Image (cartoon, rainbow, N blue to C red):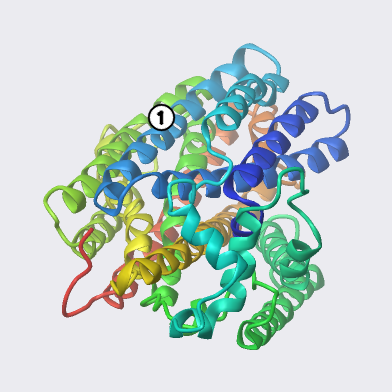
């Protein structure tokens, strides 16, 4: 996500956004046509690359489309679309798995993404988000700097280079020699490798490999070393102030202004981004699985049973940006309230009695947890554009500082999204490890030592044992899911002290 955001700074939002959608579309079709598991894994990886770019850039573009007073409203609208997708996803996925072939799960993406591709191609201006700026002034700056302007004298080189790419002569290829020099190739490779090794270690730990295995330890060690190299490399090229533009600027880690714009408390925002995704993602993926394995529902029914969570998540997504935008309630207050509410919701869900009958109270607890997640989720994205405000020092400075704000906004929001995804992966893996640690040995003994390699295959294994053993297995699974919910409760509770780090004497209002 960070890589696509930085590329969009260099190659324009439109070109990178369209490329991301095209990658997602092509490899969605390739996934549906896969004949082997290896093919599906490879195609799925490339599909994820395209999806990551499209997701991060769609958020950035939407925020840049509107003036700051309307950012909260636009964020709420985007959140509503995301909510519909998450509400309908488990239901449609369950219906497909019950009634037809799995290939349709991927094939349905193709026509929808193709329509989005055409709309983006026709609707987004080529120079977005700078298509409405004072182009004559920018063109003058691109050709020659005014030595009397102290700001441009101090920061003129990188600004001139970037402005020059916005107004390329007709027919000139955008990814030229000058632009290629700005790409942080080493930083890009380090981000990819560090993220992949970290995600792989947490995904496999506790399922295929134990936490003490050489596989997990090696991956975690390699990832840690790569992150250290990444930080040192980004610090080096940021402080060098050369033609290369760092994919993850050092100022994001130090909260210091390297280009005259202070991005306040960015590292604290990123810490919170790291925590907000886990409870949401685990609930959306694991709760339908619980309804299937513990209570014996099919995929469609299990998806419907999660609607109370997703519906109240939608309410929270709409309420918090509205309160922040219209009533000017400081986001920090709603972040604290949402964190406490979801902590309560997940704690209550973890107390559900271990029975084979669905307790009605589970829906009320889902409502509480979903509302808490919804209140918190959109607010950090709303706050990002307000932590780098341009100073009012005349038209020239405002235009230049607005350009810097847009660049910081793109990388800042994409970095937040990437931290959110990484946090979700780690929380999901910890929850899975806790679940497997509680259920693994018991399932092995109940299934006579022929337990499945993962819980995904457990549904078929249960059908081949006597009913009394099935009931005992379901009780064991229910206890495991309750343990997993305690992990979500702890993650939600950890949001409270991190949110307090964002506290200011004069709170941010949007």
Say which residue label 1 marks: 84
Callout 1: helix, strand or loop? helix
Name the residue located 24 percent from the left edge and 51 percent from the top edge: 69
In the figure, 322 relative to 167: above or below? above
Q: Quadrant of residue 200?
A: bottom right
Assess disc 1: are there few (<14), some (14-19) or many (≥20) residues with their C-alpha within 10 Å of its C-alpha.
few
Q: Is residue 235 left or right of residue 478?
A: right
Name the residue located 70 percent from the left edge and 27 percent from the top edge: 464
In the figure, 393 relative to 448: above or below? below
Quadrant into which the N terminus falls: bottom right
Name the residue located 31 percent from the left edge and 71 percent from the top edge: 394
In the figure, 296 relative to 166: above or below? above
Q: Quadrant of residue 178?
A: bottom right
Q: Foreground: 142 or 355?
A: 142
- Tag count in the figure? 1
Q: Position of residue 3 (x, y in %)?
A: 65, 59
Residue 84 is at least partly visible in this image: yes
Q: Is residue 75 left or right of residue 94?
A: left
Q: Position of residue 409 (x, y in %)?
A: 46, 61
Q: Is residue 435 left or right of residue 454?
A: left
Name the residue located 65 percent from the left edge and 72 percent from the top edge: 245
Q: Position of residue 8 (x, y in %)?
A: 61, 54
Q: Position of residue 51 (x, y in %)?
A: 63, 42
Q: Quadrant of residue 218?
A: bottom right
Q: Foreground: 369 or 264?
A: 264
Q: Foreground: 322 or 242?
A: 242
Residue 430 is at least partly visible in this image: no
Quadrant into which the C terminus falls: bottom left
């Amino acid at each position: 996500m960070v890589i696509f955001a930085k590329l969009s700074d260099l190659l324009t939002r439109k070109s990178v956004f369209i490329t991301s959608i095209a990658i997602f579309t092509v490899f969605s079709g390739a996934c549906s046509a896969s004949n082997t598991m290896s093919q599906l894994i490879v195609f799925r990886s490339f599909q994820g690359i395209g999806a990551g770019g499209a997701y991060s850039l769609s958020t950035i573009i939407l925020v840049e489309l509107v003036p700051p007073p309307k950012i909260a409203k636009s964020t709420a609208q985007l959140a509503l679309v995301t909510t519909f997708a998450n509400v309908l996803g488990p239901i449609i996925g369950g219906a497909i798995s019950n009634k037809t072939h799995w290939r349709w799960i991927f094939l349905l993406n193709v026509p929808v993404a193709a329509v989005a591709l055409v709309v983006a191609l026709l609707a987004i201006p080529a120079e977005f988000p700078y298509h409405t700026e004072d182009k004559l002034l920018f063109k003058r700056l691109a050709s020659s700097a005014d030595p009397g302007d102290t700001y441009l004298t101090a920061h003129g080189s990188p600004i001139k280079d970037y402005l020059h790419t916005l107004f390329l002569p007709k027919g000139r290829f955008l990814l030229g020699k000058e632009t290629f020099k700005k790409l942080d190739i080493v930083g890009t490779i380090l981000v990819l490798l560090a993220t992949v090794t970290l995600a792989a270690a947490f995904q496999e730990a506790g399922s295929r490999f134990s936490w003490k295995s050489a596989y997990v330890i090696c991956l975690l060690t390699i990832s840690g070393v790569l992150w250290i190299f990444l930080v040192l490399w980004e610090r080096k090229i940021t402080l060098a102030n050369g033609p290369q533009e760092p994919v993850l600027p050092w100022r994001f880690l130090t909260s210091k202004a390297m280009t005259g714009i202070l991005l306040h408390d960015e590292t604290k925002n990123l810490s919170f981004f790291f925590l907000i995704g886990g409870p949401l993602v685990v609930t959306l993926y694991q709760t339908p699985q619980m309804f299937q394995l513990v209570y014996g529902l099919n995929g469609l029914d299990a998806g419907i049973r999660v609607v109370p969570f997703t519906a109240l998540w939608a309410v929270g997504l709409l309420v918090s940006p509205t309160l922040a935008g219209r009533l000017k309630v400081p986001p920090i207050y709603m972040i604290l309230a949402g964190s406490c509410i979801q902590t309560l919701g997940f704690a209550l869900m973890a107390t559900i009695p271990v029975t084979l009958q669905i307790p009605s109270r589970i829906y009320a607890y889902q409502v509480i947890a979903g509302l808490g997640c919804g209140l918190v989720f959109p607010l950090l994205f709303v706050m990002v554009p307000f932590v780098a405000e341009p100073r009012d020092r005349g038209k020239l400075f405002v235009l230049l500082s607005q350009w810097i704000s847009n660049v910081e906004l793109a990388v800042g929001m994409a970095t937040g999204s990437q931290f959110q995804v990484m946090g979700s992966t780690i929380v999901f893996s910890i929850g899975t490890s806790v679940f497997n640690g509680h259920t693994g040995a018991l399932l092995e003994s109940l299934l006579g030592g022929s337990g499945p390699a993962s819980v995904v295959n457990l549904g078929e294994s249960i059908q081949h044992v006597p009913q009394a053993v099935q009931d005992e297995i379901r009780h064991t699974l229910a206890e495991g899911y309750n343990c997993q919910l305690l992990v979500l409760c702890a993650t939600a509770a950890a949001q409270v002290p991190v949110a307090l780090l964002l506290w200011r004497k004069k709170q941010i209002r949007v």
